[in-house]
Image: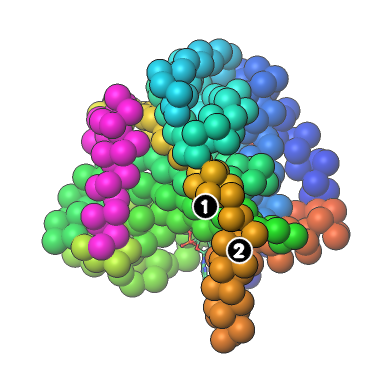
Amino acid sequence: MVEQVTLSLKDAHELSLSVLQSNGFNEDHARSIADVICACQLDDCHSHGLYRLLVCTNTIRAGHVNGEAGVTISEPSPASVHADAHGGYSLVAFEKARPLLVQKARQMGIAALAINNCYHFSALWPEVEKLSEAGLAAMAMVPSHAWVAPAGGSKGTMGTNPIAFSWPRIGEKPFTFDFATSVVARGEIELHRREGRPLPEGVAVDSAGNPTTDPEAALDGAMLTFGDYKGSALSIMIELLAGPLIDDLTSIESLEFDGGKGSTPYHGELIIAFDPHLLSGGRTKENNARAERLFSQIVDQGARLPSQRRYEARAKNLKRNAIEIPKALYADILKLLN
Ligand code: NDP
Ligand code: PYC
């Protein structure tokens, strides 16, 4: 049993801001990072919660992310927005470009946001969930570092390449999923290593290409995609759509750029927003009812919707106004205060 520390939501956010600002992130960047990691911790998404303070701090201390970067927004076409993050984390760029993405999706039915030249460490669900709160369906995807072997191979080639999707519901929180195309996120393997827990089988191979449940050997070897060749193909699609399609780096190039510093990946992000009203010819009410029928049939047979666990965790943690993190993680976070 891992010993835990309980923090109020306010203390968790203030601690995050202090760590980030005392390590060189300006107010805008620190706030955007603190907001997203605290949102993850609130939903018990531990691999992308307060643990990321260690990762973001290591990255800026390695001289690899610009904690004061501005954002340049451009409109290459009526249905696309580009946000140049100028070497900062992606989050400020997303926040600054989001209103224009929403406006264009509502005008055109579909619009894309490409964020370029960004460091990226965060979960994607907070972004697509926000777009669905504005009444849009949305998808987001990013490459990472070349840690994941293609189906049939054993050499890190693709990233952990998450894909997130969100659908707006009337009177309910959005239907949202967000997962890595590797069997688990790399952050999950890092948490297993920190806590000395073995991995489940089928997650990774060691550097000789043999199956392993040892987190250290997995991090030195290669991770595997979910669903064999199907996850592998999805992962390659994400490399292409959130890489060369938007004039940005693949996971192979991101790892080369890192040069062994172990910083967060550097690449682009693709976000696509769809307006259900325009795309359904204004028949939103009937089509919402169709979607709800689908959700009911899933839930009525005892299956659960993705995001149900998160929403339940959010309600529980909001009610007690607190989150929990491992005591050892809390101690490591305190050491980051300058
Ligand atoms: P999981 O394998 O835990 O999958 C998460 C998704 O699947 C969630 O939407 C989850 O909903 C849903 N889900 C899980 N179990 C079930 C079930 N039994 N029935 C229905 N739905 C289910 O997460 P990963 O390890 O793949 O990814 C974790 C996070 O890591 C993601 O947020 C991702 O964005 C992030 N990540 C970020 C990367 C980056 O480069 N920035 C790279 C890789 C990952 P629920 O949450 O409700 O359980
Ligand atoms: O957990 O795989 C991961 C990850 C990569 C970049 C940020 N998170």
Which one is in front, 60 or 248? 248
Task: Identify the disc placed on residue 207.
Answer: none
Residue 231 among those drawn in magenta: yes
State the CA–CA distance, disc 1 to disc 2: 9 Å
In the displayed structure, 174 sits above or below 92; it is: below
Which one is in front, 78 or 23? 78
Label 2 neighbour load within 10 Å: few <14, some 14-19, many 20+: few
Which quarter shows the N terminus? Answer: bottom right
- Disc 2 is placed on an element classified as helix
Furthest-bottom residue in view? 301
Q: Which residues are magenta?
A: 230-253
Amino acid under disc 1: Ser
Q: Which residue corresponds to the image point at 69% horizontal and 37% vertical from the top-left? A: 35
Residue 259 among those drawn in magenta: no
- The residue under label 1 is 280
The x and y percentages for residue 25 are: 62, 20
Q: Image check: 324 left or right of 147? A: right
The x and y percentages for residue 213 are: 34, 67
Furthest-right residue in view? 320
- The residue under label 2 is 286
